[in-house]
Every structure is written in structure tokens, then in C-alpha cells.
Amino acid sequence: MTLAWIVGASLAGGLLSIGLAAAFALTVRAAWVPMLVSFAIGALLGAAFLEVIPHAFERLDAHTAALTILAGIFVFFIMEKLVLWRHCHTEDCEAHDQHAADHDHGRSGTMILVGDTVHNFIDGVLIAAAFLESTQLGVITAIAIVAHEIPQEVGDFLILLHSGYSKARAMVLNMISSLASLVGGVIGYFALQSVSGAVPYLLGIVAASMIYVAVADLIPGLHKRTELRATVSQALLIALGVGSIALARLAFGH
């Protein structure tokens, strides 16, 4: 019965958070996506620094947690190079052209999907741990996770659209990524002690993906627009993204 609760909550939680986020992100006009990328940056940085990193530091000593995040950033740098090499074999490739199209040829989208999949896996482990304690705690934890995920998932959708993914493909890939919560929940049920020991390190990888995509891939694109109105708009939307994570944390902290 407990396993059934874990499976149901993991599936429902992942699909509900993505569904609610998609309801917003998929109705956004295509012309708005580059502007709303600023919100996505804020949501990523807010999730990393207000939610993920504090949890990692609670479970690991500061130096180990910081080293894990640093190693994660290096890994994502290498991954992005591999994505570039896959699409480019010559120096005059479009990806090397600073005046190329606004989207980034899928690079930040790939990074986000990797980080989001790991994050969903961790959510599944947390749901399993809560249900093993009590059904009530499990339900409350699942609700809290959905509430935390919605603003971040909105940001993820916007990044995928900005990376050149179609709305349908972004939806399908996010659905597939959400299944990692089911995997985490089932593995957590059968081997919670073994899996829970890896969670702090996985949190470091999640934080690294969020920071890397925001700082290395998305923020440089904002600097292409230097006029005052655009700068103010970008700053306000970044603050709104951070604020959405802070508000979710205050309202549904767990």
C-alpha cells in the first residue's frame, strides 16, 4: 500500500507541476519568450540559492558541498562543449557566429533537461522517505514539492522554447523528465538508505546545472540589449523569478 502511495504521488506530483507550468508557458506568445527568459534566470538562481544549495549544505560540510557544485559546473561546461561539437565541425559554424539567431541551438535546453531530471529523481526519493514515515506526511510533502516546482518548471519551459525547441517537443521532454520522480520514488522505497546518502551530492549537481545555465548561457544574451528600458525590464523580471521561488518557499516550505 505504501509503495502504491509513493508511485501515485510521484506520478501525480511530477505531471501536475509540469501541467500547471505548461498551462502558463505554452500560452505565452513566441515574441515574449526572449523577454521572459529574464524570469527564467531569476527562477533558476532563486531555486539554486534559496532551495537547493541550503539543503546540500545541511547534509554535507561546506567544503564538500562547494566542491561538488564546482565539479558540477565543470561537468556542465564539458557537456556543453560536446553539444557544440555535435552540431559544429568547422569554425564558421553558425554556433560560432555571434550574430546568429536568438536561440542557442539547444545548448541551454540540454543542460536544463539533465539538471531537471536529477532534481525530479531527488523529489521522488524525498516523497518515498516521507511516505515511509506516514501517509499524511507523504501527501503534505508531495503537495509542497509541486508548489516549489511550478515556478521553476515555468522557467524551464521558457528556456527550452528559447533554445529552439517547439512547444510540443518541450512538453514531451518535460513529461519524460518528470518520470525520474517515479524512478526515484520506487528506488527510494526499496533502498532508501543507500540512495539518501547520494542525495546531497546530487543536489550539488542540480545547483550546478541551474547556476551554469543562468550565468553562462542566458545572462550573456541579455547584454545584447543595452538600452535603459530593456535593462530595467530584465532586472524586474529576474527579481520576479527569484521572488516566485521565495514566495513558494515561504508558503509551502518543507
Image: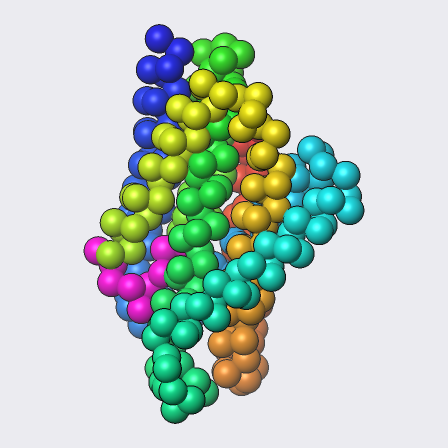
Q: Vertical placement of 14 versus 104: above or below?
A: above
Q: Say left or right for 227 vs 65.
A: left
Residue 212 inside the magenta-drawn segment:
no
Q: Which residue is at a point 39% across and 61% down the rendered structure image?
A: 109
Q: Vertical placement of 182 versus 69: above or below?
A: above
Q: Say left or right for 58 vs 229.
A: right
Q: Which residue is at a point 42% across and 45% down the rendered structure image?
A: 117
Predominant secondary structure, magenta span: helix
Q: Position of residue 223 (x, y in %)?
A: 54, 80
Q: Say left or right for 211 vs 92.
A: right
Q: Say left or right for 3 vs 126.
A: left
Magenta stretch in the rendered image: 156-168
Which of the image's four quarters has the N terminus?
top left
Q: Position of residue 251 (x, y in %)?
A: 55, 33
Q: Vertical placement of 60 versus 236: above or below?
A: above
> Can residue 218 be seen by looking at this rendering?
no
Residue closest to the eye, 14 or 118: 118
Residue closest to the eye, 53 or 148: 53
Q: Position of residue 197 (x, y in %)?
A: 61, 29
